[in-house]
Amino acid sequence: MGLNDSDEPRDVVRRQYLASAAGDLEALRATLAPDVEWTEMAGFPLAGTYRTPEGVTSNVMERLGKEWDGWTAHDDSYVVDGEHVVVLARYTARNKATGKDIVVRVAHHFVVRGGLIVRFEQFTDTAKVREAMA
């Protein structure tokens, strides 16, 4: 069984990162449950909780694409405990308005059930992101 047809929580999360990096929002939505709850951290430019796969991609990925060049979450290491997947990662991007680059550490907590992401929560240094936007 390959990465693309595995329901293992780690593989589902990995597919989400690969789809995001490729800008493939359809493939990204395919990793999300219909009732997904996706929370961007308070203080982050897109702070809030978004629901439905379409709600997540339109309010998060599409908005990041409008404001940043090359926004990428690099999934460096995984900690998996049953349906819980914590990924220690980095964001890299260049802000379109200021031309400033970011390299920011981030932790993502996913909950995966039945081969789909049902919950996501982001933890990051929001000040570093905002600094690049000013």
Image (cartoon, rainbow, N blue to C red):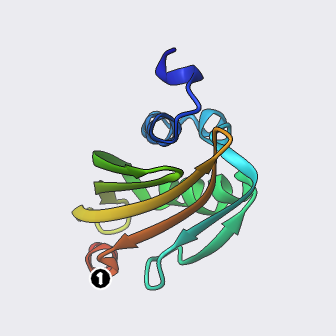
Helix, strand, or loop for circle 1?
A: helix
* Closer to us: 87 or 105: 87
Mark 1, Cα crowd under 10 Å, few <14 / some 14-19 / many 20+, is few
Residue at screen point 29% across, 82% down = 127
Query: Which image quadrant is residue 103 in?
Result: bottom left
Which quarter of the figure is the C terminus placed in? bottom left
Residue located farthest toward the front when viewing the structure as drawn: 82
Taking the view exactly as shown, the residue that stands out farthest to the top is 1
Q: Is residue 111 left or right of residue 14?
A: right
Please state which amino acid type lies under the numbered disc 1.
Ala
In-image side of 116 versus 78 (left or right): right
Report the residue at 61% width, 40% height from top: 25
Closer to us: 77 or 75? 77
Q: Is residue 108 above or below residue 34?
A: below
Q: Is residue 98 left or right of residue 36?
A: left
Residue 97 position in % (x across, y down): 37, 67
Residue drawn 48% across and 16% down? 2
Compared with 26, 47 (above or below) is: below
Q: How many marks?
A: 1
Q: Position of residue 62 (x, y in %)?
A: 58, 53
Coordinates of residue 8 in the picture (x, y in percent): 52, 35
Residue behind mark 1: 127
Asked if 37 appears above or below 31 in the picture, the reply is: below
- x, y percent for residue 77: 26, 47
Depth check: 35 or 21 in front? Answer: 35
Q: Residue at x 34, y 75 (%)?
A: 133
Q: Quadrant of residue 86?
A: bottom left
